[in-house]
Amino acid sequence: MTLNPCASEDPLSPEEDLAELELTDADILEAMREIPGYLDITTMDFRAVYHLAHRHALDRLFSGITAGRLMRREVRPLTPDIPLAEAIPSFVRQGLKSLPVVDGQRRPLGILTETDVLRGLGAETFLALMARVIADEKCIKSEQHHRPVGELMTAPVVCVPLDAGLRALLAAFASHPGRAMPVLAADGRLAGLLPRKVFLNACHPDRRP
């Protein structure tokens, strides 16, 4: 599933961080009294100007945020026939906790997450798996880690185009709990992967890379 521009473990979600402050008439009147001279403007007009100014300010401050600029390009995706035992080392080598699953044309079929892997191994959390391994190092059965990725992946996957901007990315990340999203080229093929953490950092001007 692809979300177009019209469309937690995070300490602060972008939606909360960028939300407008709700002004009351009393707030507006108090502010207007602090401005010397006479202001020929109603509280309704002031509120309309505020909303428009807030939108323009966000567009200016975050105009550089697009999926194509933030994404990680060097991603080696998985294919649905790869066994879990081969997929897990790929996570480790790439330092990722989510990997796209693609067809022969690099078109996303789904995404394999750390949660999917744990579920495939019969565990709810990483610590639960470690507790089992410590208690019995042979607790993971051969048939579990030889299951193909296609049976375990999350599908359909939420994807975004290269030119998806701030609002489109907010909507996309809000629509699923995953840690990353595939980014698609104009032809629908995988162009890269956008980690949630990278996007959240870009939403804070003082923490941008």
Image (cartoon, rainbow, N blue to C red):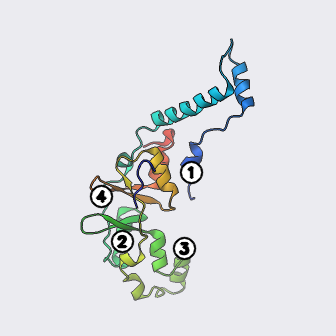
How far, Cα to Cα, is label 4 from label 3?
33 Å
Is the residue marked by circle 2 packed among few (<14), some (14-19), or many (20+) residues within 10 Å? Answer: few
Mark-to-mark CA distance, 2 and 4: 27 Å
Earlier sequence position, callout 3 versus callout 2: 2
* Residue 136 on image: x %, y %: 51, 87
For the residues marked 1 and 3, what is the alpha-carbon distance in whole angstroms? 23 Å
Give the residue at mark 3. Answer: 125
- Secondary structure at numbered mark 4: loop
Which circle, 3 or 2, is nearer the viewer?
3
Q: Rounded to the nearest whole Å, what is the CA distance between mark 3 and mark 2?
A: 18 Å
Front tag of 1 and 4: 4
**Which numbered mark, 1 or 3, is in the foreground of this view?**
1
Amino acid beneath label 1: Ser
| Amino acid type of the residue that numbered disc 3 sits on in the rendered structure | Thr
Query: What is the number of the mark on residue 188?
Result: 4
Up-down relation of residue 181 to residue 113 (above or below): above
Most foreground residue, 138 or 80? 80
Which three-letter amino acid code belongs to the residue tagged 4? Answer: Gly
Q: Nearer the viewer, residue 61 or 141?
A: 61
Residue holding disc 1: 13
Mark 2, mark 4: which one is toward the viewer? 4
Q: Earlier in the sequence, mark 2 or mark 4?
A: 2
Percent from the top left, x then y, of residue 21? Answer: 64, 38
Say which mark, if any, is on residue 186. none
Marks 2/1: CA–CA distance: 31 Å
Write down the residue under mark 2.
Answer: 89
